[in-house]
Amino acid sequence: MRKLAFVAPAWLYVAVFYLYPLATNVRMGFQDFTVTSFYTGVAPFVGLRNYREVFRDPAFAGTVTNTVLFTAGSLLLQFGIGLALAVFFKRNFPLGGALRSLLLVPWLLPLVVSGTAWRWILETDSGVLNRTLLNLHLVSEPVPWLASTDLSLTAVTLVNVWVGIPFNMVILYGGLQAIPAELYEAAQLDGAGAWQRFRRVTLPLLRPVTTVVLTLGLIYTLKVFDVIMVLTQGGPADSSQTLTTFSYDLSFQQLAFGHGAAVGNLLVLVAVVFAIGYLRAERRTP
Amino acid sequence: MKRLTAAAAAFAALAVLSACGDGAGTAKDDTGTLTEIDYYEAAPQNTQLPKLLDACGTEVGVKIEHQQVPRAQFMPKLLQQASARTLPDLALVDNPDLPQLAASGGLVPLKELSTEGLYPSIVTAGQYKGDTYGIAAGVNGLALYYNQDLFSAAGLQPPKTWDELTAAAKALTKGTRYGIAFSAVGTEEGSFQFEPFFWTAGANLKQLDSPEAIKALTLWKDLVDGKAASRSVVTWTQADVNDQFMAGNAAMMVNGPWQLPTLNAKQGLKFGIVPIPIPAPTAKPVTPLGGEMWTVGRSNPERERKALAVLKCLLGKDKSLEWSTAAGYIPSNQAAAAALAQSNPQLAAFVEEVATAQARTADLGTDYPKTSEALFNAIQSCLAGGKSPQEALKAAQASVK
């Protein structure tokens, strides 16, 4: 009895702030929820119609491809660069600590601020990146980073990588610290070179941390919204639209809330699948 | 016993939550204060409107609580208020959004207010299923601004036709300066900027891939491909376009009268304004009607009566002229607009166009936002994605079917 009383507030909190909105969103995905529904409160159930219409939307296929490319590209580069930096900073060298702290800056800045700065940097005509490239004669005319359907996804992905490197580096650095130095000494005595020590000692022992970083990174990247919103709003012509910005666009720009909720539910579903996979993997590792 | 305590705690928490909901309801019964919402974020509009509201509030004998939210959150905010039954008494709604909002049933029909003497297109834009739900104090449109110093240095006259526009834009493109700037951003603003060319060419929103529509988009594509306009037009809002023009990065721009207060304040900038160029000397310019409509949200008879009284004051001759002058709008009243054009030559081009302007929702009503999205996506995929105007517009037409 007493136990229940202690648990109740937690349950209430979860119910009010997580279960209720989630259930509402799931329900909304099956409703014809229009502008009128807000005033009248009437939103007829339409079964899977919202989902069918979303799948048939000409923008949907491109949006899914964008989401996959954005997520895979971000994860790969964030993890790769983050790991390289973590290994680099493991050595002791002058100013190493200061440099490592400085690398955290992207993480500390509000995304709207850094996103706006990047928008200026990447501006076609007056952005500092194009000015530099032109002055170095690396390009003959300005590169339309955010103003071309071919480049916008690459541009937002690179900015997102910049945002994500500190997170990867910090967690992986922590993981590296936990690997006993004796193992490296032993490997060295056995004649393992630097690359072999990395492959046979660092990577296997880092696996639990790697799983955490990649799963969390995946969930974070799937739901990235602000970076894209500030840089391109999903444009031009939906070329940098991902499922999150698509869902926002459907709900809050086109005011098709049923469709927006359907896309939101798909996202939740994907995240849940990966989260379950992660929990399974967690259980398997001793 | 313990379980009961827990249940009681849960119940108390829910009661607190629902009490918050009731709190808003009680506020609604107070008729001494009216609420107002709009999306003006910049001066002079956001400083002038509260002044007018206070003046009209004093006249009617109510206090008016003024609230502003960013444009992108305006409709969601109104909808959220509609669902909580706390719609503001007065809302200044962008005219293409009006039919959707009226369809929700949350607005009061403005039967007692007269629309006599107003431009017919403005009256149409405020109607839904035959009833008037919104009336604008002032409207706006788009015209072509040109930099007088650059034009006279090049010995050019402001363009009247599309050919002249393209020629002037090419002639004035030099170094980091482009001949022309316009907004092809992926929002309603992009469609709004394109519609003068689209309609003047003779195209119709019901058929996005007509030869006339292709002709209009080809004009824009040639300007961008010919480097007479920046590729960044797909990311520029109308405010960005104005910044480019003020900074001397563009010799011409497509923009509205609401930029006038800012432009006039800029030292050393000499500019002129002409109507949007037309494809052939015989064509009739048709521009989209821009501007916001006053609406009254449903509450109780007493509040609605007071809100209507305030609206009558805001739409009155003096107040609407005061608003138009201070905020860069064209009065909705035809006679007032004509008088203003006489006294202020800067507005002449806009006034001329408002007479033939078309309400964006006139043909499509509540379907307009979806078609507009298809249109701005087509513009973007053509200007930024290398699609031909035909392909882009064909895809757009297919997506709205």
Image: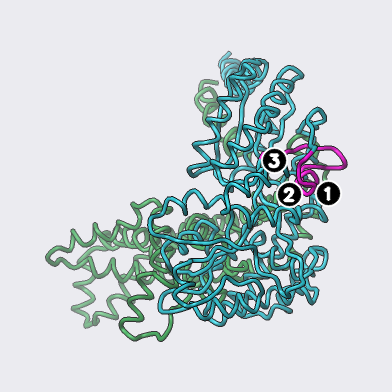
Chain colours: A green, B cyan
Residue, x 55% and y 44% (percent of image)? Answer: B70
Instruction: Kindly indicate whether the residue at mark 2 contacts the one at mark 3 (C-beta within 8 angstroms).
Output: no
- Residue B331 seen by the camera: yes
Q: CA distance from mark 3 to mark 2?
A: 32 Å
Residue A121 position within the rendered picture, expressed as x and y whole percent measured from the top left: 38, 67
Marks 2 & 1, CB-CB < 8 Å contact: yes
Q: Residue at x 24, y 63 (%)?
A: A180
Quarter the N terminus of chain B occupies = top right
Q: Looking at the image, is B271 positioned above or below residue B326?
A: below
Can you identify the residue that label 2 sits on?
A258
Q: Quadrant of residue B340?
A: top right
Residue at the (59%, 48%) spot, across then down: B72
Relative depth, front residue between A57 and B154:
B154
Q: Which residues are magenta?
A: B117-137
Tell me the SS state at disc 2.
helix
Q: Please name the residue that numbered disc 1 is placed on.
A: A46
Callout 2: chain: A
The chain containing the residue under callout 1 comes to: A
Amino acid type for the residue under numbered disc 3: Ala
- Secondary structure at badge 3 equals loop
- Do tags 3 and 2 sit on the same chain? no
- Residue A257 in the image: x percent, y percent? 71, 48
Single out the residue that lies furthest toward the left. Answer: A94
Percent position of residue A39, x then y: 75, 34
The one nearer the camera, B111 or A16, is B111
Count of numbered badges drawn on the protein: 3
- Label number found at residue B136: 3
Q: Which circle, 1 or 3, is nearer the viewer?
A: 3
Chain letter of the residue carrying label 3: B
